[in-house]
Amino acid sequence: MISLYWFIRNPVLPSIDSLNEKSEEEFIHAINVLFEAAPPLADELYKNRPYKNYDELITKAEYITEKLSYEDRIIVINAHPRIGLNPNNELISALSYKEQGLDKEQKVNEEEKKEILETYEKLRKLNEKYEEKFGFKFVEFVAGRPKKDIVPVMEKRLNNESNEEIRTGIKAMMLIARDRLSKLWTQGFDIHLKKQNSCLNPMYH
């Protein structure tokens, strides 16, 4: 039997048929694995059920966000966690923890730890500067890059206009959702149920 600890460490998605049949609250909770979705997006996605697959759901999310008002787009973007959160000070989802490379940071030496803490401080200041200028959070598809590589990206994007930045942030959110989907399918719910039924050692999970 798969343990509760496995599910906490490895978020999974229900089958698309199961998702389509869920209550609104259950539906929104499930898709938060992909989007950390705010009401303007989550509510519209629920209204547009059923979906043939999760790829169609993300495509619909892209369409919905294009049609949202500027104010609602800000709400959608601000549901996403900040880049560069210090896990010792902030709560962060299991997927964001891995996406931002926080699991790897637990295995560094003292010199590397010092550099990481300096990067955290740079990102904290840049996040403040960005949010003060634009009024919403900076979102970037990190794609496995170290945090220090995000610093110049933030510095460059601070020169952009608000409309360009909100489009860039929404696009990044959708790239993150598609990346999460690909990873969740490779280690997804049905696959692990098959492993469970094959009587694999539960300690493996």
Image (tube, rainbow, N blue to C red):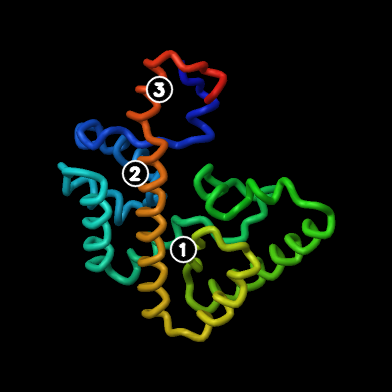
Kindly report which numbered mark, 1 or 2, lies closer to the viewer in this rendering: 1
In the image, residue 18 sits, relative to residue 50, either above or below, namely above
Label annotation for residue 157: none
Looking at the image, is 139 positioned above or below residue 184? below
For marks 1 and 3, give the CA distance. Answer: 31 Å
Q: Are marks 1 and 3 in contact (CB under 8 Å)?
A: no
Q: Kindly identify which residue carries mark 3.
A: 195
Q: Residues within 10 Å of mark 2 (few under 14, many from 20)?
A: many
Residue at figure coordinates x 84%, y 54% from the top left: 110
Q: Is residue 189 left or right of residue 24?
A: right
| Mark drawn on residue 141 | 1
Q: Is residue 13 left or right of residue 9?
A: left
Q: Which mark is residue 31?
A: 2
Which of 66/172 is in front? Answer: 172
Residue at the image position 42 percent from the left and 76 percent from the top: 165
Does 174 sit left or right of 51 as displayed? Answer: right
Query: Quick one: 158 or 76, which is closer to the camera?
Result: 158
Label 3, secondary structure: give it: helix
Going from N to C along the chain, the mark reached first, 2 or 3, is: 2
Dot 1: few (<14), some (14–19), or many (≥20) neighbours within 10 Å? Answer: many
The percent coordinates of residue 170 (x first, y second) are 37, 66
Q: Is residue 74 above or below residue 31?
A: below
Measure how far apart labels 2 and 3 are at the Cα level: 24 Å
Between 88 and 107, which is closer to the camera in this rendering?
A: 107
Q: Given the image, on which type of amino acid does mark 2 rest?
A: Ile
Residue type pointed to by label 1: Phe
